[in-house]
Image (cartoon, rainbow, N blue to C red):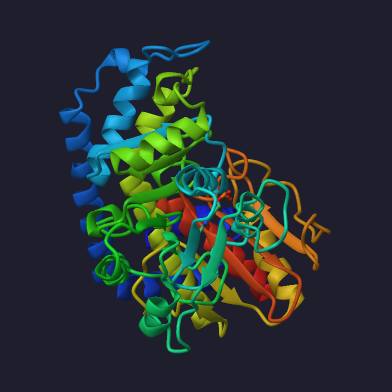
Amino acid sequence: MKESLFKIYDEMGISRTLADRADEVLDALKDRFAVIDETAEYNQLKVLKAMQEARVSEGCLHGTTGYGYNDAGRDTLEEVYAGVFHTEDALVRPQITCGTHALALALMSNLRPGDELLCPAGKPYDTLDEVIGIRPSAGSLAEYGITYRQVDLKPDGSFDLEGISSAINERTKMVEIQRSRGYATRPTLSVERIGELISFIKGIRSDIICMVDNCYGEFVQTVEPSDVGADMTVGSLIKNPGGGLSPIGGYIVGTRKCIENASYRLTSPGLGKEVGASLHVLPNMYQGLFLAPTVTASALKTAIFASYMLESLGVEVSPAASETRYDIIQEAIMRDPAKLIAFCKGIQAAAPVDSYVTPEPWDMPGYDDQVIMAAGAFVSGSSIELSADGPLRDPYSVYFQGGITWPHGKFGILRACQELLKV
Ligand SMILES: *Cc1c(COP(=O)(O)O)cnc(C)c1O
């Protein structure tokens, strides 16, 4: 590292010893980072190609108000998403408020009373418990007479194919597969494995709708679940595909029929995709998608760098440093509340926004244990920006993700490691 870099790291609270260690770690990561850059290059061209083919023009960046009839920018953006994901259609809207909303919309619009939903790869993301009615909730699928079945992964992480085939019955209308591990301990599924699972299910009954929760997975590989047979692929724009710029929104890409159903539920039967003003968010949604491949690469480098740095400090990490990544989430098992808190303080101190505040554990609604969160993001709650959180309970794991530029991700991890060394 150059002396001028050491100097500014020193001014920002990073010791020479830690900066030297970072140099060593990065030397050994050159080949892995080259692969990430190559994936980003491919995905950058994929996005560019979709934008050019959809003839994105300056006029597309102007929004509409009111009903939003004839919102060419909105319609073209949806065409771009369909182009990137290679699907018949797409629904990409600021009116989809978050990832959970996008997932709920995909489920509720395509299931009818008497249908059954199957999760063939274990329990879905926590916030879907109340959507599905796993935890009783007003307005859940269960309340509408839509039943739920789940087949867990086998202890070795493989699909329980026998269990899945016996769970499928004449009422099984849809399966939901979560790509990312989220905040669970199971491994993240590669797009290839998702493809194998979809083929297996379609082999039993080809009319079962296969839906994938793609949160945190977009642009990590050169293929997406929609390339391997998913009928609906769903995610949040304040994660990977928003590129850190989208201030709100969610997407569903998939078959014409599934998207039509989703649009009728998002707005109203009969109106569908024809209404929904884009207001002033289109420039950020377009530019965010344009940046998303390299932003995701930065987040991926940050996660891998963090795992090596932490392992070198004797902290157990999951996925392990050397493991191949299929999403951007990293878990570090601190086994000590003081270390969990110190790590989060370091991430906060490295943020561009609210760097001077100190995160404290608090009693978050809906959680039994106190939770500590570190985020100093331009977009509130954005988890493609560098952020960390963890519940104050054994084994005191911190989950972190994001980093919209690699130099910031690197600095954030070093700052967090520096705090850890003080414990
Ligand atoms: C973030 C996430 C969600 C939910 O998204 P929100 O925007 O927080 O509602 C769903 N599934 C997975 C795997 C996620 O990572």
In the rendered structure, the answer to whether residue 144 lies left or right of residue 225 reads right
> From where the camera sits, is residue 133 visible?
yes
Which quadrant would residue 101 be assigned to in this image? top right
Q: Residue furthest bottom?
A: 156
- The quarter of the picture where the C terminus appears is bottom right
Near-viewer residue (210 or 30): 210
Res 291 seen here:
no
Judge by depth and name the residue closer to the eye, 393 or 335. 393
Percent across and percent down for residue 370 are 80, 65
The residue located at (75%, 48%) in the rendering is 357
Q: Residue furthest right?
A: 363
Give the number of marks: 0
Question: In the drawing, does residue 221 fall left or right of residue 94?
Answer: left
User: In the figure, residue 273 lies in which quadrant?
Assistant: top left
Image position of 135 with respect to 106: above or below? below
In this orientation, which residue lies closer to the viewer: 54 or 280?
Answer: 54
**Where is the N terminus found, in terms of image quarters?**
bottom left
Q: Residue at x 61, y 45 (%)?
A: 381
Where's residue 123, x and y in %? 55, 70
How far across and down, in percent of the image, does residue 61 sit?
A: 36, 18
Q: At x 80% / y 68%, what residue is drawn?
A: 369
In the image, residue 174 lies at what x, y percent?
42, 58
Task: Judge by depth and name the residue closer to the eye, 237 or 323.
Answer: 237
The residue positioned 40% from the left and 57% from the top of the image is 212
Residue 338 is drawn in which quadrant?
bottom right
In the image, residue 329 above or below residue 159 = above
